[in-house]
Amino acid sequence: MGRRRVHRVERATIRSTSTRTRLILALGKTRVNDFEKSNKILRFFDAEFEKCIIASSRGAGSRRTESARIMPEQESKQADNRPRIAVVGAGISGLATAWRIRKKAPEVDVAIFEKNERVGGVIGTRIVDRFLCELSVDNFFTTVPWGLDLCKELGFQEELQSTSARYRRTFVVRNRRLYPLPDGFMTMAPTKFYPMLVTPLLTPWGKARCGLELLLPRRRSDEDESLAGFAIRRLGKEAFDRIIEPLVGGIYGGDAAKLSLKATLPRFAEMEEKDRSIIWSMVKSAKKSRRIKREEESGARYSFFVTLRCGLQALPERLADRIGRERVFLGRGVSRVERDGDAWRVVDEAGKAERFDGVVLASDPASASAALRESAPEVADLYGQTERTGVAIVHLAYKNEQVRRPMQGMGFVVPTSEGNGVVAGSFSNYKYPNRAPEGTTLLRVFVGGARAPEMLDLPEEELVRRVSDEIAVLLDVAGAPIFTDVARFPSAMPQYYLGRLAWRERLDRALESTPTLALAGSALDGVGLPACVKSGYDAADKVLANLRKS
């Protein structure tokens, strides 16, 4: 089979309709052998989609009729004087904001403005030739409640999927070979001693230096410290370069020498303060976690990461359905947010203005800052200082017989010292079942980030060639991939650099002068899906509380 070239993410999005969401949910429950029929149904659905929309728009029930494009201000004038809140951005943070408002204050009229033609922001799912490709995030943490709880509220209990127990193993690249991450190593420190003693990733000196962490004193200074500075001080440069740096890079895509420890992984600073040794603290924590797990007698249990069987795009789609599609205005970006007495005027890119009692900006920092330049210049200036990096995600698929050195694990991370621009990769159909046709292997490879931003500018053919060349060496692959997909996200990953906490305090003080205006998104208090959901909830709570005071 020849290589299948797929359009990049801008041209490769799933249409935002509740009908298709329900269809994807249904097909997501099929077995691998049934995907042929599923794909035919999806292709037929897409081919007939425009006809159905045109026909249904003549009826009163269509979500995309011209009546749905009537300005919310005109509707509210005709209806009542309910409080109105505008949410700018229909990514997961913006949708979570609107969902929180609808739940806590159903009397409030919400309007969501989104410049793109679909909801979800960077979240996106494609099913092509029976390959399920997540265009950005492919799962989320269960160690914090907001993502998991939201899925349950929306009725996704049966769709939640844990990682495959058989493949819960991560590899680290060293000299273009894959080595297992020492069992029990958690981001910055080990929880087990023996795997560290026998790992080939470290030299005897590197292991000895890592062990000395048990004897080192606490740091006395309260000054902000970088992730690299902390890790090297506690565990040594070799452990940092070969294990910790690639793990951190896989999460943030940033430069560990600039990333703030307290803004990214504050629990490690807290461990040092409380227990002195982070290794000892991690060992105690791991023992406690295992004891709690043994004491659990009932209830659903999930792995450290979970996803949706049908793809994560279903989450924003269902959120939009529950909020009400008539409240979501796609293809309508916001250029300015102006003060109007105690209220706000939201001006879209076509120059149309509407009055709202509160506003939540859940768009990217650059767009939000531009919109606030005149009405809240201090907020705009501070929020606009957010530094970001970009990432490209390359999907590669091979027949199983092409992969002559298969890895029995979920994925791998790559140290900067390898010098190839690859940040990390995952084996999609090992990590979660039913993501590829039987007899094939599907990989997701992350490239770019702070270490190689130039990779995002490469032509698609060159980008795929470079990535597939690296994968060919790591897995001893014979021949070209049978399927490829490229998604690019320039400036999508905020970087929590040194001084971040002080910046956050200044931003909060600046926002005190705008009690009915709030910000939400990954640039504030966390980059994962659960953190974005919480960010939206916090923004909704702030605006609602201050509206009630006024």
Image (cartoon, grey):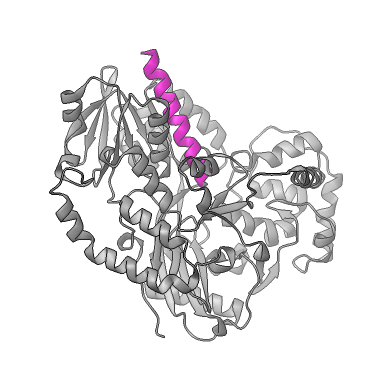
Q: How far across and down, in percent of the image, does residue 392 sit?
A: 44, 62
Examine the structure image and report whether residue 140 is included in the region drawn in magenta: no
Image point 26% across, 34% down: which residue?
336
Predominant SS along the magenta part: helix
Residue 253 can be seen, yes or no: no
Looking at the image, residue 375 sits to the left or right of residue 185; the answer is left
**Quarter of the view holding residue 342:** top left
Image point 55% across, 80% down: which residue?
472
Instruction: Using the image, determine if residue 79 lies above or below residue 254.
Output: above
Looking at the image, which is closer to me, 259 or 17?
17
Instruction: Using the image, determine if residue 150 lies above or below residue 343.
Output: below
Image point 58% across, 64% down: which residue?
431
**Quarter of the view holding residue 289:** top right
Residue 401 can be seen, yes or no: yes
Picture quarter with the C terminus = top left
> Which span is picked out in magenta?
529-550
Looking at the image, residue 15 sits to the left or right of residue 94; the answer is left
Looking at the image, residue 408 sits to the left or right of residue 209; the answer is left
